[in-house]
Image (cartoon, rainbow, N blue to C red):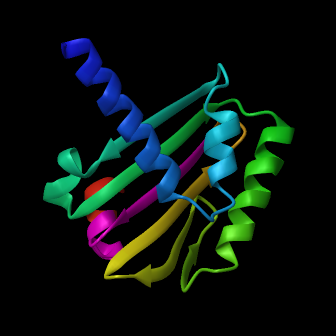
Amino acid sequence: MKRILLFILMLLGIHICMLAQKGLAIQSAFDELAVRQNATEVVMGAGKLKKYRLRLFHSLEMKCPSPAERRRIETLVQTDAAQAILREETAGHRIYELQQRKGMHYYIFYRCTEQSLSLIYIEGKASLKQIKSYFLK
């Protein structure tokens, strides 16, 4: 019984993640590249994030991404960045806030170097300032 319940919860988590980035180009990065050997995907839902006023945290970390992988993700991020209402671009990272819907904020965080690549999608009621204080210490 516990295995069945765990399996159902895993399917629900996967379904929620698929819906979260629906309509965004970066969804294909999570779909295609998260299964690579040099990639780590982390998904956290509302239960673990409630105290941060967030509903979803979905990240993709890649060690030593190939030039093709870097170009692919860069193109996807730039596609979604075209919709951004707020941009913060520095040499070290990029942060994009997408259009709010129903009181929810949507963010894309991106950082890429020769050694690593990080792509993070976050949604919730927390402001960008709050998210920075939580995660960018």
Residue 37 at x, y = what percent? 65, 19
Can residue 65 be seen at all in this image of the molecule?
Answer: yes
Q: Is residue 125 magenta?
A: yes
Placement of 27 over or under 105, stated as above or below: above
Can residue 137 be seen at all in this image of the molecule?
Answer: no
Image point 43% across, 82% down: which residue?
100
Residue 124 at x, y = what percent? 31, 67
In the shown orientation, is residue 103 left or right of residue 83? left
Residues 31 and 79: in front is 31
Placement of 40 over or under 106, stated as above or below: above
Residues 104 and 37: in front is 104
Placement of 81 over or under 134, stated as above or below: below
In the shown orientation, is residue 102 left or right of residue 3? right
The single residue placed furthest to the bottom in the displayed view is: 85
The answer to which image quadrant residue 83 occupies is: bottom right
The answer to which image quadrant residue 22 occupies is: bottom right
Residue 39 at x, y = what percent? 60, 28
In the shown orientation, is residue 101 left or right of residue 18? left
Q: Is residue 101 magenta?
A: no
Residues 11 and 67: in front is 11
Q: Quadrant of the N terminus?
A: top left
Q: Quadrant of the C terminus?
A: bottom left
Image point 48% across, 44% down: which residue?
59
Image point 69% across, 60% down: which residue?
25
Residue 136 at x, y = what percent? 36, 56
What's the magenta region?
117-131
The single residue placed furthest to the right in the displayed view is: 68
Image point 35% across, 54% down: which residue?
56
Count up the numbered dots: 0
